[in-house]
């Protein structure tokens, strides 16, 4: 297998695909019966919409990939069985839907969707379960029930909601209104990890009258809450380890008694239900172990429909681990659709792959028209593009205080990778501590110099526990290395309103002052 690696600019993946699409060779295997909207797309490479042909020369200027190499790649892709794999992180930028829509379009033009080793894939190499082979059985699960409150917000718009109650916003073709939130009840998660522009969030987090959280450790979420209900870790309770994308079920048997006053989440919620007079309706007469038994037994019935025979609960609990056999045949994405699109339509309005979507076009969103397109991003305000990826030393921000994560730090700060050229021009070497800043804020990080990253780009993992120099003060220096101090809190588009953290520019200077101690892992002073 020949290997060809290119280093294109960040955030231009859809532009690269457009440059490849422009080559007629990429349309050799196109199957019209599977798709809708090629006529609209064909106007883009010709420049009919804006006077700029989207050809390989245009893509070269955008991506830094030579036009000749783009042409050669297009011909190579059309001449062989080709699968296009896209990392999930591309969605977390302005116009983040476009790389995925363009990926499906390019795969459609190649005509290999539904064939083994062809078409497209998402998350290969960054998600351990993608492509691993499993039956569609989803394991034990709870019913989601029905929430009588129908108002909702996209998860990335929490700060907007708290700061702007009653303000309308667009989302997926609808205009919704931000509710007026007086109480926040949060069980699981850390908003000071996953949200952007944390200084803006600090202001918003003061608006509710009461914030209640379930927490196991003194994360920033717990520090900035009014009421903290101590929750058990996985070692302090019984549970079942299973997910819809897993071939294994784990009997997670309690190893130690709950520490201090901590309770498992079910016990906490059952206690609240009892105080509210709805305990019987909530518990249905079962304790936590009883519910594990109930959902496991329910899953045995569903498993039979997938040709899976599960042992009874007692046997499963004694064995501790259950492995589900691989499917007898390999799964090929969209094979049944390719073989018979009328009998196996897609869940789109037309039942086909929609290169052009009449429904999305009808939303009349300037930042997401009814077809894949290159949309220019705002000019950067600083010299370096910041990428903030998922960490390899912890899961999101979980267990950042653990020894493995802490051992990866540089002078107790989260590591930041920078190209040798950018490091030299700023007088930086491995092990230095730097201040990373823009108009939204600043944080400290430890330096790793590597030619594995492009000039003009720096990279730092998310998940360092938020640790401002002056707790609660907007604009205070974050001294641990949390990049969401400087990421912008705007929606990827009016369609998705998703996170756009990867569209961020910064400047970096060497930190020459005495280093402030990292206090993120120290418990707060209690009255």
Image (cartoon, rainbow, N blue to C red):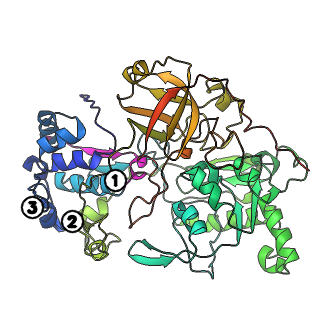
Q: Looking at the image, can residue 51 be seen?
A: yes
Residue closest to the eye, 355 or 350: 355
Determine which quarter of the picture holds residue 309: bottom right
- In the rendered image, the quadrant that contains the N terminus is top left
- Checking the image for residue 33, the label placed there is none
Dot 3 crowding, Cα within 10 Å, few <14, some 14–19, many 20+: few
The nearer-to-camera label among 2 and 1 is 2
For marks 2 and 1, give the CA distance.
16 Å
Q: Looking at the image, can residue 114 be seen?
A: no
Q: Which element type, helix, strand or loop, lies under badge 3?
A: loop
Magenta stretch: includes residue 87: yes
> Marks 3 and 2: CB-CB under 8 Å?
no
Q: Which element type, helix, strand or loop, lies under badge 2?
A: helix
In the displayed structure image, the side of residue 447 where residue 418 appears, left or right: left
Residue 526 pos. (x, y %): 89, 48
Mark positioned earlier in the residue sequence (1 or 3): 3
> Marks 2 and 1: CB-CB under 8 Å?
no
Residue closest to the eye, 522 or 102: 522
Query: Badge 2 is on which residue?
Result: 34
At x 51%, y 30%, the residue is: 416
At x 87%, y 75%, the residue is: 274
The nearer-to-camera label among 1 and 3 is 3
The nearer-to-camera label among 3 and 2 is 3
Query: Badge 1 is on which residue?
Result: 332
Residue segment shown in magenta = 77-96
In the displayed structure image, the side of residue 428 where residue 494 appears, left or right: left
Dot 2 crowding, Cα within 10 Å, few <14, some 14–19, many 20+: many
Query: Badge 3 is on which residue?
Result: 48
Determine which quarter of the picture holds residue 180: bottom right
């Amino acid at each position: 297998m020949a290997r060809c690696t290119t280093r294109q600019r960040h955030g231009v993946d859809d532009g690269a695909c457009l440059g490849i699409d422009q080559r007629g060779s990429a349309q050799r295997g196109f199957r019209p019966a599977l798709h809708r909207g090629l006529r609209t797309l064909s106007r883009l490479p010709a420049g009919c919409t804006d006077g700029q042909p989207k050809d390989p020369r245009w893509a070269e200027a955008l991506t830094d990939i030579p036009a000749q190499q783009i042409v050669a790649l297009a011909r190579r892709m059309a001449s062989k069985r080709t699968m296009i794999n896209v990392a999930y992180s591309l969605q977390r930028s302005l116009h983040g839907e476009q790389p995925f829509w363009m990926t499906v379009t390019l795969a459609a033009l190649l005509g290999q969707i539904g064939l083994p080793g062809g078409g497209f894939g998402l998350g290969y190499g960054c998600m351990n379960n993608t492509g691993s082979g499993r039956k569609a059985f989803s394991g034990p699960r709870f019913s989601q029930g029905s929430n009588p409150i129908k108002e909702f917000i996209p998860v990335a718009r929490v700060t907007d909601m708290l700061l702007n109650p009653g303000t309308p916003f667009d989302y997926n073709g609808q205009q919704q209104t931000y509710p007026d939130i007086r109480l926040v009840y949060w069980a699981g998660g850390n908003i000071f990890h996953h949200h952007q522009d944390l200084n803006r969030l600090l202001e918003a987090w003061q608006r509710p009258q009461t914030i209640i959280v379930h927490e196991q450790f003194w994360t920033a979420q717990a520090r900035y809450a009014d009421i903290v209900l101590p929750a058990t870790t996985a070692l302090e309770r019984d549970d079942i380890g299973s997910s819809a994308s897993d071939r294994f079920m784990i009997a997670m048997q309690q190893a130690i008694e709950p520490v201090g006053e901590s309770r498992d989440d079910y016990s906490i919620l059952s206690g609240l239900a009892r105080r509210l007079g709805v305990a019987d309706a909530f518990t249905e007469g079962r304790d936590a172990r009883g519910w594990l038994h109930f959902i496991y037994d329910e899953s045995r019935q569903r498993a039979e429909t997938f040709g899976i025979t599960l042992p009874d609960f007692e046997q499963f609990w004694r064995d501790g681990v259950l492995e589900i056999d691989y499917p007898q045949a390999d799964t090929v994405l969209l094979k049944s659709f390719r073989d018979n699109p009328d009998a196996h339509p897609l869940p789109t309005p037309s039942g086909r792959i929609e290169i052009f979507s009449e429904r999305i076009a009808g939303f009349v969103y300037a930042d997401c028209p009814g077809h894949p397109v290159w949309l220019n991003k705002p000019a950067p305000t600083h010299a370096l593009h910041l990428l903030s990826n998922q960490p390899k030393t912890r899961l999101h921000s979980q267990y950042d205080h653990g020894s493995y994560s802490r051992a990866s730090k540089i002078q107790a700060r989260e590591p930041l990778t920078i190209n040798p050229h950018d490091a030299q021009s700023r007088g930086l070497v491995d092990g230095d501590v730097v201040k990373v800043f823009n108009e939204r804020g600043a944080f400290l990080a430890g330096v790793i110099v590597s030619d594995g990253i492009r000039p003009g780009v720096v990279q730092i993992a998310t998940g360092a526990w938020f640790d401002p120099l002056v707790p609660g003060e907007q604009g205070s220096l974050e001294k641990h290395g949390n990049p969401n101090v400087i990421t912008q809190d705007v929606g990827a588009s009016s369609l998705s309103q998703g996170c756009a953290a990867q569209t961020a520019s910064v400047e970096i200077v060497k930190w020459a002052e005495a280093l402030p101690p990292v206090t993120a892992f120290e418990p707060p002073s209690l009255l």
